[in-house]
Image (spheres, rainbow, N blue to C red):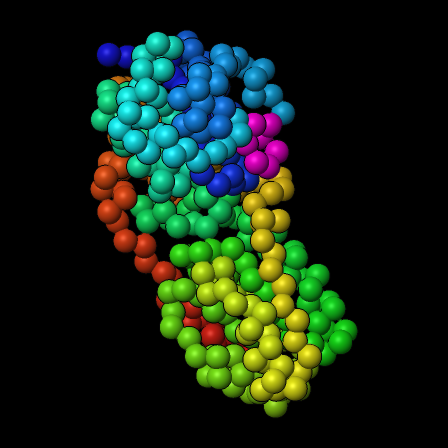
Amino acid sequence: MAARAIAVLTSGGDAPGMNAAVRAVARTALSQGLRVIGVHRGYNGLLNGDVFEMNLRSVSDIIHRGGTILYTARSEEYNTPAGVEKAAQTCRDLGVDGVVVIGGDGSFRGARDLTGQGIPCVGIPGTIDNDIACSDYTVGFDTAMNTAMEMVDRIRDTAQSHDRCSVVEVMGRRCGDIALETGIAVGATSILVPEIPYDLDRDVIERMRFTQSSGKKHFIVIVAEGIGGVADIAKYIEEKTGIETRATVLGHVQRGGSPTLRDRVVASAMGHHAVDLITKGIGNRVVAMQGGKIVDFDITEALNMKRHFDKDLYEVALNISI
């Protein structure tokens, strides 16, 4: 049966570009004569009835804004069979025939559960870490990297002025993509990521000494959040090399800010595709990017996929950061 109304929510950590996805979902659906229900604070909004009817102007002037106008939250109650059933009943009471869920793996598991209760759901990958295995790219990744790059560029100015080493932690608990690409972009001497085993003496100290021999006097070490311990790493570097070393954790500054062109365009294309699936009565799917094209996968299949770290790009970083 063709959809009459759809709901849209954002769940998990916020990511720049989520608003562009919400905008695309709302305007695509409205242009096809569907009602659109905005859900506040993720699955909590379905549990608590925190919803509102959207129109074309509901999403005006949001494409350039970071964060999410729908707000986001995690819900313990939803992670129970009773919670999922309650959320499904809210959808039925509202006349909602499908839900677009913008978030990460946890959000997609929630979408799969809701689909199991008869409410077709489609997920859009919105997470700055780029850690969704089925998709080459996730909404928010480009903006987060550009923010990290700008911050490290500023840190490097000070490191250069004082002949220092700066150890900078960027986000990425299980995924080193932000660290890898930011590290290449800022010319980091060393990049430490969860996917590649490391030895501080071999991968940091020896590389610093080698570049010192060619006249280099300041250094940047990029560390993914999943490695952690940047203060201890900085202390170790200073003890081993005698170079004044400072640690910086960029933290949630990487989540915010106006989304880049790429994040706005990809989010818009993914939002349009998600509505197209729901209007055809297709649910339990995750929208993804593969080879530069927008595609979709079964949610369970997507969740079972394994991420592949780009070791070739990591080798590039090793070879040029000397």
Residue at the (60%, 60%) spot, across then down: 249
Give the x, y percent position of residue 119.
28, 20
User: In the rendered structure, does residue 100 fall within the stretch colored magenta?
Assistant: no
The quarter of the picture where residue 255 lies is top right
Where 87 falls versus 252 (above or below)?
A: above
Give the x, y percent position of residue 71.
53, 30
Give the x, y percent position of residue 313.
42, 65
Magenta segment boundaries in residue numbering = 62-69
Where 267 falls versus 85 (above or below)?
A: below
Residue at the (51%, 43%) spot, across then down: 140
Left of 112 or right of it: where is 227?
A: right
Residue at the (28%, 22%) spot, across then down: 85
Residue 158: in sight, yes or no? yes
Query: The C terminus is located in which quarter?
Result: bottom right
Give the x, y percent position of residue 256.
60, 43
Q: Nearer the viewer, residue 159 or 251?
A: 251
Residue at the (38%, 62%) spot, across then down: 310
Left of 68 or right of it: where is 82?
A: left
Kindly give the residue lying farthest to the right in the view shown.
161
Which SS type dominates the magenta stretch?
A: loop
Where 204 falls versus 157 (above or below)?
A: below
Query: The N terminus is located in which quarter?
Result: top left
Q: Nearer the viewer, residue 102 or 49?
A: 49
Residue 264: in sight, yes or no? no
Left of 204 or right of it: where is 61?
A: right
The quarter of the picture where residue 49 lies is top left
